[in-house]
């Protein structure tokens, strides 16, 4: 009982001075931190709390990375770092419980409040909660200290960084949230640590076009001394449903907890799919008598997934999912993307023609999953793991992480399956049995567990380079393809032991500036492999990868991305985009045609056009070179939209125009001309569906495209480009960006105030026209 007495006394003293915000509340806690890297003298959270934040610590906002990294980042920072923040206790209800939720803290975390150790956590990709209540000063300044250690860890894995084919970065690289709750409240799904419980768990059953049963399980904690009889009320809105209401009553003992479950049948539901990502909002509210004491909103979708060896049926219809793998890193800032930047990545994936993404090789950001819900992108979500399987401590950590990942993300309709598997390493059958059991235990009913070994899993995920013989008795996802099988002829698992390399002109690892010939070869590999995947019984495939990325293993970028590390597309991205039907009726579906050529004399031999049109006509300087139907060959015979090939070769400068036809009518057009001398710079802010926002540490790419006098990209321009900015924003990296294939990228960070921002760029005496940007403030917290 001592806890309750202290809680009530301290917080009542703190809050009676002024009217404040009532619980429940949830606010970002990202601003006003201090940061340092531990040097020669060890630091300690208690001593920092006692002595105060030392001089010389850097002032930072979250998300944050310990060190800005070059591109490529082969030697990413590893070590021990500290974050600290001064704050005053919020003026709120006398019985408020205050906690912090850390979405991502790499990798081993310890937290102190006012010198008292309040939390420890191991693992950098899943959240943890620190209870502030007992250590909080209600009437004076508080000091929070966080210690992080991102050095190689045998318990969490994966491989040591120097042998790892990706980076793990560091810092408080996702959001931190301050939450206020009443003594009686809806619990946090991860912190509650309950099997198939905690927080709000929404499942949909008996789904059809005419009806769907929504089952809502709620977990309630009561930290008061007395039992309470509560009323729980659920309201569902969205897709024409106007605050449908249902609920019940539940008795929760003092100092205890309880679960309650209610159902509601929605008539004629709007079903979630990649083409129609319909979402509903569930509002759950707790009452004692007529007094509301807690409420939460949960977004969910209604869809029926059935996966068998014959394939995937979504809402009763068979379909194939065209997909891609994605690493979450950005240039310079590593993992420290803003939520908006996560959304922009999802937008780019959908825009590139994909309806499925594997978040290799770890759990993704909640903001990324939210965007996948909204854009209609299925997700295969893995636990952390790559070519390393440790001891018993590793096993238990991986299995516990499996539970926490499912508890965090189970309400997302975008989740296709859970990858409870350690990538590309043999796992004991006992581990597989336990992982699969955990998956079904944590999500009873409509759920599937995937793994890369044939034993045990509901879904077998197999990289194309590992394909030997078909296993028709199990559902199949081609987890990776298009890269490794064209890179190393031995196609082995241990990538630090590469051998039998193919010539560099033939593999898929091509920089955006490597020229037309090599980029076409990458697109050829992609086309051949994807077409081959369609000959198997797989119901989904995932190209490796969406974006180029850095890794600890080698000093160069991994260049197999359909787009580069700055999110600029290569020819391969346009191939995938052409595979989306023109008439899906979504914002990402439209007729398109793209000429994969720079049309340079002596280089451009033959013209390949990516299009989802029925016919394409190609003209050279206004003269028709023919009107064609799609290619028919062994590399395209299963594609929804094969490319169009023309025999023309460039002998002198000229202009190509491709016109796409659907139903005999012009549907799309694209023009490419031999570039002349540099004359202009065209600036673009890459919003990718999400405008810039202030107050959230937002980051966006700015592209300076060097063109000739006619507006054609000068694709061989590779000189430095100077970027300038005025207003409440700054460029993240101070080194002058180099143009590649005529485009120089820079990363812009938006400040706290927003307003009007002006951008400009210059190179070689060429100055751009100013680009004016209007920045909106961050929306209020829920």
Image (spheres, helix red, strand yellow):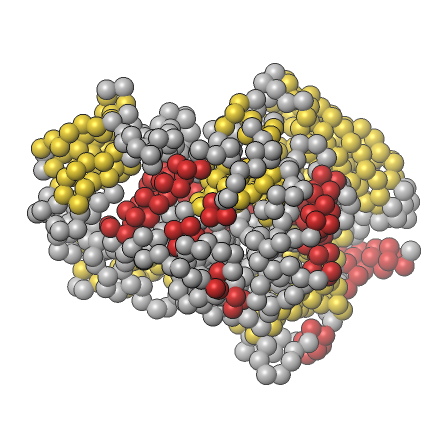
Q: Residue at x 25, y 37 (%)?
A: 609
Image check: 614 left or right of 63? Answer: left
Residue 7, placed above or below residue 712: below
Task: Tell me the quadrant of the picture where the N terminus can be found.
Answer: bottom right
Q: State the image quarter where residue 765 is shown.
A: bottom left
Q: Residue at x 19, y 53 (%)?
A: 714
Residue 40, placed above or below residue 266: below
Residue 380, placed above or below residue 61: above
Extreme residue toward the top, this view: 210
Residue in the foreground of this view, choosing between 648 and 30? 648
Image check: 252 left or right of 124? Answer: right
Task: Tell me the quadrant of the picture where the C terminus can be found.
Answer: top right
Extreme residue toward the bottom, this view: 40
Answer whether residue 645 is visible to the viewer in this image: yes
Could you tell me residue 301's position as x and y percent? 60, 31
Could you tell me residue 475's position as x and y percent? 58, 35
Q: Residue at x 44, y 37 (%)?
A: 533
Q: State the image quarter where residue 588 is shown.
A: top left
Answer whether residue 611 is visible to the viewer in this image: no
Q: Tag count in the figure?
A: 0
Could you tell me residue 418's position as x and y percent? 62, 43
Image check: 98 left or right of 308? Answer: right
Residue in the foreground of this view, choosing between 342 and 476? 476
Extreme residue toward the front, this view: 469
Could you tell me residue 156's position as x and y percent? 65, 61
Residue in the foreground of this view, choosing between 594 and 508? 508
Q: Residue at x 87, y 40 (%)?
A: 252
């Amino acid at each position: 009982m001592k806890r309750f007495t202290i809680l009530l006394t301290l917080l009542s003293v703190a809050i009676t001075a002024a009217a404040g915000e009532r619980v429940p509340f949830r606010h970002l806690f990202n601003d006003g931190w201090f940061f340092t890297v531990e040097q020669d003298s060890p630091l300690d959270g208690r001593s920092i709390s006692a002595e105060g934040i030392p001089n010389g610590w850097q002032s930072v906002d979250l998300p944050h990375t310990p060190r800005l990294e070059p591109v490529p980042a082969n030697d990413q920072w590893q070590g021990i770092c500290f974050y600290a923040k001064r704050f005053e206790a919020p003026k709120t209800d006398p019985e408020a419980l205050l906690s912090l939720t850390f979405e991502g803290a790499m990798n081993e975390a310890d937290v102190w409040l006012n010198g008292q150790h309040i939390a420890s956590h191991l693992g950098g990709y899943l959240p943890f909660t620190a209870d502030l209540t007992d250590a909080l000063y209600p009437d004076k300044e508080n000091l929070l200290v966080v210690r992080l250690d991102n050095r190689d860890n045998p318990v969490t894995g994966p491989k040591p960084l120097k042998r790892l084919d990706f980076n793990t970065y560091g810092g408080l690289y996702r959001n931190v949230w301050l939450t206020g709750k009443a003594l009686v409240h809806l619990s946090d799904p991860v912190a509650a640590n309950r099997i198939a419980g905690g927080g709000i768990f929404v499942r949909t059953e008996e789904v059809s076009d005419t009806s769907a049963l929504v089952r809502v399980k709620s977990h309630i904690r009561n930290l008061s001394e007395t039992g309470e009889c509560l009323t729980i009320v659920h309201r569902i809105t969205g897709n024409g449903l106007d605050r449908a209401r249902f609920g019940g009553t539940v008795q929760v003992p003092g100092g205890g907890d309880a679960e309650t479950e209610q159902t509601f049948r929605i008539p004629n539901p709007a079903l979630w799919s990649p083409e129609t990502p319909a979402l509903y909002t569930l509002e759950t509210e707790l009452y004692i008598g007529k007094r509301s004491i807690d409420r939460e909103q949960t977004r969910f979708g209604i869809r029926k997934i059935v996966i068998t060896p014959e394939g995937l049926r979504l809402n009763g219809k068979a379909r194939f999912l065209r997909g891609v793998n994605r690493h979450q890193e950005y240039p310079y800032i590593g993992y420290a993307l803003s939520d908006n930047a996560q959304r922009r990545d999802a937008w780019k994936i959908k825009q590139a023609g994909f309806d499925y993404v594997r978040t290799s090789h770890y759990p993704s950001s909640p903001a990324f999953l939210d965007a996948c819900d909204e854009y209609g992108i299925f997700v295969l979500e893995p636990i952390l793991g790559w070519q390393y399987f440790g001891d018993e401590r590793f096993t238990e950590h991986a299995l516990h992480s499996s539970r926490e990942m499912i508890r965090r993300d189970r309400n997302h309709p975008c989740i296709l399956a859970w990858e409870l598997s350690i990538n590309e390493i043999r796992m004991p059958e006992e581990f597989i049995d336990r992982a699969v059991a955990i998956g079904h235990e944590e999500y009873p009913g409509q759920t599937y567990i995937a793994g890369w070994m044939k034993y045990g899993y509901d879904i077998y995920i197999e990289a194309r380079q590992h394909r030997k013989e078909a296993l028709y008795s199990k559902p199949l996802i081609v987890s990776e393809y298009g890269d490794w099988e064209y890179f190393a002829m031995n196609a082995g698992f241990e990538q630090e032991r590469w051998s039998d390399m193919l010539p560099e002109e033939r593999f898929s690892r091509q920089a955006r500036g490597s020229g037309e010939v090599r980029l076409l070869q990458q697109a050829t590999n992609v086309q051949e492999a994807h077409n081959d995947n369609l000959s198997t019984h797989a119901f989904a495939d995932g190209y490796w990868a969406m974006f180029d990325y850095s890794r600890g293993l080698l000093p160069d970028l991994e260049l197999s991305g359909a787009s580069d590390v700055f999110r600029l597309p290569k020819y391969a991205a346009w191939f995938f985009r052409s595979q989306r039907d023109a008439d899906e009726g979504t914002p990402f579906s439209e007729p398109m045609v793209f000429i994969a050529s720079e049309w340079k004399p002596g280089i451009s031999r033959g013209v390949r056009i990516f299009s989802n049109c029925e016919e394409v006509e190609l003209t050279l300087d206004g003269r028709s070179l023919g009107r064609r139907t799609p290619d028919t060959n062994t590399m395209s015979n299963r594609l929804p939209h094969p490319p169009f090939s023309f025999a023309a070769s460039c002998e002198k400068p000229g202009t190509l125009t491709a016109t796409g036809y659907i139903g005999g009518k012009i549907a799309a057009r694209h023009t490419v001309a031999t570039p002349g001398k540099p004359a202009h710079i065209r600036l673009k802010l890459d919003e990718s569906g999400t405008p810039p926002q202030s107050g959230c540490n937002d980051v966006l790419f700015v592209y300076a495209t060097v063109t000739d006098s006619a507006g054609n990209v000068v694709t061989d321009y590779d000189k430095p480009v100077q970027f300038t900015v005025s207003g409440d924003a700054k460029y993240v990296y101070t080194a002058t960006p180099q143009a590649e294939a005529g485009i120089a990228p820079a990363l812009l960070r938006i400040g706290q105030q927003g307003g009007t921002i002006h951008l400009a760029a210059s190179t070689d005496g060429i100055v751009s026209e100013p680009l004016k940007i209007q920045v909106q403030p961050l929306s209020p917290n829920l």
